[in-house]
Amino acid sequence: MFHVKQRYDIVVIGGGHAGIEASLAAARMGCSTGLITMDRHAIGRMSCNPAIGGTAKGHLVREIDALGGEMGKIADFTGIHFRMLNMSKGPAVWSPRCQNDREWYSREALRRIELQNGLDIIEDTVADILIEDGRVQAVTTGTGLNIGCAAAVMCSGTFLNAVMHTGTTTLVGGRYQEKASTGLTEIFLKHGLTAGRLKTGTPPRLRRDSIDYQETEVQPGDENPTPFSFQNRKIENRQIPMYLTYTNRRTHEILRTGFNESPLFTGRIKGIGPRYCPSIEDKINRFADRERHQIFLEPEGYESNVVYVNGFSSSLPAKVQEDALRTIAGLSRCVVIRPGYAVEYDFFPPHQVRHTLETKRIKRLYFAGQINGTSGYEEAAAQGLVAGINAALSVQEREPFIVGRSEAYIGVLIDDLINKSTEEPYRMFTSRAEYRLALRQDNADSRLMRHGHALGLISPKTLERLDAKETRVASARAYILSERLTRDELRVVLGNHADTVIPDSESLNQLLRRPEVTLEGILRVGRVRTSEVIKDLISDVDAMRRVEIEVKYEGYLKRQDEQIALFKKNEAMTIPEEFDYAAVKSISNEGREKLGRIRPRSIGQAMRISGVSPADVSILMISMMR
């Protein structure tokens, strides 16, 4: 155990994915930081699926990396299966995902925490938080330590007053064989915050050697996987396959026999579960006409004998789960190591935090992760990074760091949480971002890395590499705009397309806009391939991909730039924090209540609040002018 100081600049409570990012960011920004966790070996534990990224979630991970966070680096280092999702669609929705070695990921997260200067691990629980004059002053641990602090970041995950459900069995705990955290919710309630109840779940784990993989469909990883971290050039790890199978009518019949003992259907679970990641019993109840559902069998590591049954989250009785699993192709003789279960836990509706993730009622207390009603490692890590950065900035009396929804998915996430609040666990999707073509995963470094450098989280050397990459992109764009191919050269590129009319000449810019043409195809022309500008571009796969996207989608990107300019104009119309909404009688009752509760920073934010009508916004603008 590290020596525990009597006082830290920042105390981070919880060692999950939010806690990792918050504590590392704060320490790297020069703040003495204490990370309180029940068990140091549980730091970074992947309590549900041992995977990072996915649709839109992969965007978040790349943004975390661009700002100087750690999740992408750990994922690259411990990944065992990498895929870029949605490649059959447009680049706005391409999203990296990797399966990770579960134990290795946790060990690597702990190693990085231990090596960080200015960061101490405190293996303990939190029994009390001292709040005086509306500001955090100290925390008291379960062993009686009183630790002073200038700021605290709550990253409590699913542990606040948590209970676990399997059939009719209910146990107190935040996850398998781990205690719940009690008493903290009540402390915050005393200071005027309001709490709610949510539910999440996890599927059964099977013995790897009890599965007949010949009855399943093999899912290989990408041949040349894209790293999450912009600081990694290549994935060196050996990839192993995942496997796809399906439920069937018999599976569903057996699952229905357990509905009378389901904590979900009998009302014992009060919290609302995630809409977009429902349990298997919820799926077959809501989609009764569906004859089958996908089940992915995902090994939890190179040496692990545990397989995660993705798509089969359940809180039904253990025997029902086991009988149903054995009706699925490949699982007729499966051995269940641990049945699925649901977790019910406290959260605090996120209209109670600012865009910095500081709570509105208690100064220098920050909430990050599932305490704000989100679902997923990536959403938690993004919030942890923002909270840790802002806690450090506050302690150092520097200006806060706010990510706008027009510049990052992280901004969309936080803005949605505050303006829409949440009645169910929030999950990120590309459809939530209005400007998703501009917020692609491949350009997160250009969008955010300079912010990370200004905060002290991105090294000068890393920023130099970004500058070199952007120079390559700009030079290649200029070359493509100015260079033309002759008819003979066009035949080399277009010859395989029999219906194509080949002109006398055509600019590379116009040629690359054709849907059937790729930059790689154009490189078949020797004169282009051997030009110094293009030779330099070929050396950087990321830059090459970005050039092709920006040329092909130039018109759409210009349109989004115009929309973003209008968005920023509305964001620049700030509303005084003390503005009296109650005095504006012409605003609707609902609008007045929502505006007073959320207290938007700008007209733009007011326009995005659920229940605030365009008429309310117009009246608000007139009142401000007066």
Image (cartoon, grey):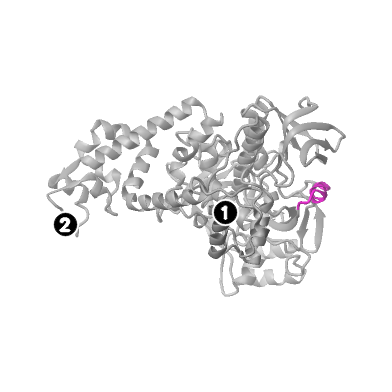
Residue 254 location, quadrant: bottom right
Q: Are marks 2 and 1 in contact (CB under 8 Å)?
A: no
Evaluate whether residue 81 shows in this view.
yes
Quadrant assignment for the N terminus: top right
At horizontal 51% and vertical 35% (from top left) the residue drawn is 451
Which of these two is toward me, 534 or 135?
Answer: 135
Q: To which residue does mark 1 refer?
A: 624
Residue 351: x percent and y percent? 66, 53
Circle on res. 553: none
Which of these two is toward me, 241 or 413?
Answer: 413
Using residue 533 as the reference point, say whether residue 132 is left or right of it.
right
Evaluate whether residue 326 shows in this view.
no
Q: To which residue does mark 2 refer?
A: 501
At horizontal 65% and vertical 33% (from top left) the residue drawn is 392
SS class, disc 1: helix
Query: How many residues crowd mark 2 within 10 Å: few (<14), some (14–19), many (20+)?
Result: few
Most extreme residue toward the front is 626
Q: Nearer the viewer, mark 2 or mark 1?
A: 1
Q: Which residues are magenta?
A: 182-193
